[in-house]
């Protein structure tokens, strides 16, 4: 499998291409194209969220630790500065240092997080996250995250083939897959896809 640096490079390429298309093909502003780029990069490292080694985990939970409190604050536009600061600081450390450890305990590396259904779920969540953006922009944001995610899975598959020795490592076929580590996890993932699709449809109409 590819390492963190290679995944970030893959994410920069996917995010770069997607944001350029969004900027020139769909008339997004420079700022919105920047969001597309960030989502492409984020998507490209997200699958390793279940990885026990510290770099991807710290990066992702640090990032999520900022994003989630900021999203939460959207619901409290009148919050005072002192409350905002405490909320962000507590939210950040709670997510980065507590939730990340609990998360690691219940996940299996290269399980459901390295699968196509999870790429779809991340795209759906991205769409729902940008609830106050235009429909087309939300779709582009979702596609950027999903493509970044699929870039990661594709890279893991490519890196699982030893090109010099024509030899396939045991990890081959465990990233670009339609299933998780068990039938139950797979079923939960598909139920999540259907439920999120329902919420998206319901919020759209
Ligand atoms: Zn991976």
Image: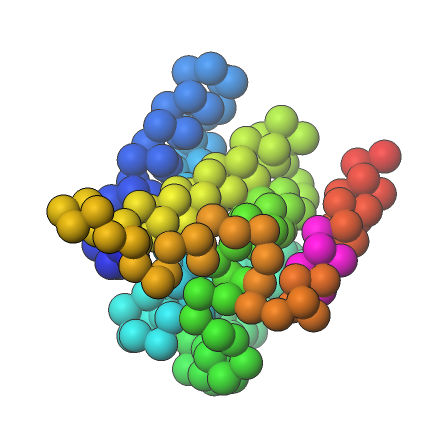
Answer left or right for 47 relative to 73. Answer: left
Which secondary structure is most common in the magenta stretch?
Answer: helix
**Position above or below: 20 against 116:** above
How far across and how far down the image is residue 178, in percent? 58, 51
Q: Is residue 159 magenta?
A: no
Answer left or right for 104 relative to 170. Answer: right
Which contiguous range is marked in magenta? 188-193
The image quarter in which residue 139 lies: top right
**Position above or below: 33 against 105:** above
In front of the other: 96 or 170 = 170
Query: Residue farthest to the front?
Result: 166
How far across and how far down the image is residue 132, in percent? 66, 41
| Quarter occupied by the C terminus | top right
Q: Is residue 191 magenta?
A: yes
In front of the other: 139 or 79 = 139
| Quarter occupied by the N terminus | bottom left
**Position above or below: 161 against 59:** above
The residue lying at 64 percent from left, 46 percent from top is 124
How far across and how far down the image is residue 165, in percent? 16, 50
In front of the other: 126 or 181 = 181
């Amino acid at each position: 499998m590819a390492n963190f640096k290679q995944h970030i490079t893959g994410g920069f390429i996917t995010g770069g291409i997607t944001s350029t298309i969004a900027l020139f093909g769909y008339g997004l502003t420079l700022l919105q194209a920047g969001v597309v780029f960030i989502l492409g990069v984020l998507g490209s490292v997200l699958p390793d969220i279940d990885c026990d080694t510290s770099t991807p985990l710290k990066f992702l939970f640090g990032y999520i630790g900022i994003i989630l409190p900021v999203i939460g604050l959207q619901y409290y536009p009148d919050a005072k500065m002192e409350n905002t600061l405490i909320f962000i600081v507590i939210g950040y450390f709670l997510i980065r240092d507590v939730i990340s450890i609990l998360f690691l305990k219940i996940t299996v590396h290269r399980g459901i997080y390295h699968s196509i259904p999870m790429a779809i779920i991340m795209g759906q969540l991205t769409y729902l996250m940008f609830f106050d953006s235009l429909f087309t922009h939300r779709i582009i944001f979702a596609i950027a995250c999903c493509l970044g995610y699929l870039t990661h899975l594709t890279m893991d598959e490519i890196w699982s083939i030893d090109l010099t020795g024509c030899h396939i490592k045991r990890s081959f076929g465990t990233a670009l897959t339609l299933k998780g580590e068990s039938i139950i996890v797979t079923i939960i993932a598909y139920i999540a896809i259907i439920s999120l699709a329902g919420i998206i449809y319901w919020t759209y109409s």
